[in-house]
Amino acid sequence: MVFPYPAYYPNQREIIQFISKAAAEGRNAVFESPTGSGKTVAVLSALLPIAEERGKKILYLCRTHEQMDRVVEELKRMAEGRDLKGVSLKSRRDLCLNEFIHETARTGGEERFACTILKREGKCVYYRNLERRAPAFEGPITAAEAAKRCRGLSVCPYEWIKGLLGDCNVIACSYLYVFDPGIRSAFLRALDSSLSMEDFILVLDEAHNLPRLAADIAGNVLTEFAVSRALKEVDDHGVPDAEGLLERLREFMVQSEGIEMRLRKEALLDRLGIEPGEVERLVDTGEEIRRRRLAEGKRPVSYLHSCASFLAQWMDANEEEFAFFSSQTEKGMPYLEILSLEPKTITRAPLTEAYLSVHMSGTLTPIEPYCDVVGVERYRSMSFPSPFPKENIAAFVDATVSTLGSLRTAEMYRRIGERIEALLSIIPGNVLVFFPSYVVLNAVVERGVDTDKEVFIERSAASSEENNRMIRRFKGSDNAVLLGVQQGRNSEGQDFPGAQARGVIVVGIPYAVKGPRVKAQIEYYNRVHRGWWGRYPLGEYYAYFLPAYRSLNQAAGRAHRSLSDKAAIIFLERRVLFDGKVWANIAPWIKENIRLTEDLEGEVAGFYR
């Protein structure tokens, strides 16, 4: 074991021993421990000796670039006096130096396409320079450091990093490199054509995201806008034989009138009357249009290619593990959707084939359902206690309010608003408030939030860039409140350490609306996951209740990202205490810090003294 620090954080030694014992037994390791508890260095300390002894590489899968870089920084400390190498990977979009690609390509797929063509035709100077100017690989390096070194030499950072992968002990990268089948194949080829998943130990940080990620990878959406653009495209490029199919496709989408509705797979295919080989020909035609546009210095996009690829996927998807829908966006745009109901369609192969896997998160309890859903076999599991000093964390429950459907009245929204205002007057600095839905958020906002803090409101229709600008302004403030939603991009996709958030108020439980999509998932899970969870079918627990509880815990933990972070967690929801199924699913590290009190405001004020 190579531990680079003179002392251990709470739980670190136990995490190392837990992983080592699981590996010695030939088992995967699955555990829960909150962010900030030093999991990264503990996991590396446990796995590096195993990987070295057995000739394996470690793929450390992360959610953000910041987390990937943290892996490399820990590896640097461990590499002192040892021959250890590792890199963090960023996307082609983040690393590419070619101005032509930046000007013409808007998506990752378009960038991959343009990059492939330019390399093949010898038109990328940064790729050509790689052979004669590539810098030496001397030890662990982050993607940002690699980009800086390569930029000074006019060498492609993305391709240089790809060339380093075969020499690395540890590679920190996105989940997509392992779980997206197409990206995984290209990734393994870049490493070494002789390698397979058996040669890797997988580490899944924030593993609770895997089921949702699998659904995103396996599913697909096609909008009426894309079909309309495809019709214009076939007219511009002289592809008359595609016009009839696209017109029938658009008519089918518009006829749904925007109502979310589950479809039979054959309903669309019967309406379109697709000829044998027709879709494949249109995919090829779309590919040629992309090449032609790139040669003309234009964006390498083909909406015909998008439509044909979607139809090919619709035709190939089986109705046992996929569901098909028509619906519309918030702005009224009709769309068709292919929804993957079975995460193991994506997760089964890499998790089964990998030599070993370690799964961890601060919100993985209960662990058995996670393993059941994604297909983790032969594993040891553990939930570690809170590592946070008692003076830095306290959780409270206000049992006087609830967002239970039958209680959602103007009077209840008024009471929730008043409780939020009272807490905002007590909690110093920045505060996060997460609601169960935009409906509840908007109802509270409409009555007004009386506070001297600067108010930031998460908007469902905001673009990623608009939301990121708002979050940067919030984090830069010293007395602000962010009003957002659970299961949202800020309650699960952002971290708020230190002074960025001194308190978290969690309103209600984020149960999904039981529309056609949710019902389809429940029906599928009830078929494949037999048994009962209390008085509920196990499938309904997995598909409906558990995602809500994981999101509740995720929102509650946004402000505790290191052992020095001091923040209170306040649940404005009586069901946290008095509904047994909710209480049973509160993360143990939060539950053990819940303080029961009849003087909520006084106790919260006392916590900050």
Image (spheres, helix red, strand yellow):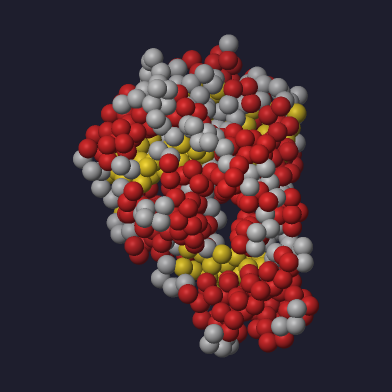
Residue 193 visible within the image: yes
User: Along the line of sight, which residue is nearer the eye, 340 or 416?
Assistant: 340
Residue 381 visible within the image: no
Q: Residue furthest left?
A: 25
User: Along the line of sight, which residue is nearer the eye, 474 or 568?
Assistant: 474
Q: Tell me what residue is drawn at x 74 percent, y 58 percent.
A: 104
Tell me the quarter of the image containing the N terminus: top left
Q: Residue furthest front?
A: 132
Which quadrant of the structure image shows residue 331?
A: bottom right
Q: Tell me what residue is drawn at x 56 percent, y 45 percent.
A: 160
Q: Position of residue 525 (x, y in %)?
A: 39, 60
Q: Position of residue 409 (x, y in %)?
A: 64, 45
Q: Tell me what residue is drawn at x 61 percent, y 42 percent.
A: 133
Q: Position of residue 177 (x, y in %)?
A: 48, 51
Q: Position of residue 189 (x, y in %)?
A: 45, 56
Above-or-below relation of 120 to 31: below
Judged left or right of residue 266, residue 409 is: right
Q: How many marks?
A: 0
User: Along the line of sight, which residue is nearer the eye, 480 or 152?
Assistant: 152
Q: Tell me what residue is drawn at x 62 percent, y 58 percent.
A: 119
Tell me the quarter of the image containing the C terminus: top right
Which quadrant of the structure image shows residue 148?
A: top right
Above-or-below relation of 309 to 164: below
Which quadrant of the structure image shows residue 47?
A: top left
Above-or-below relation of 223 to 119: below
Judged left or right of residue 214, residue 10 is: left
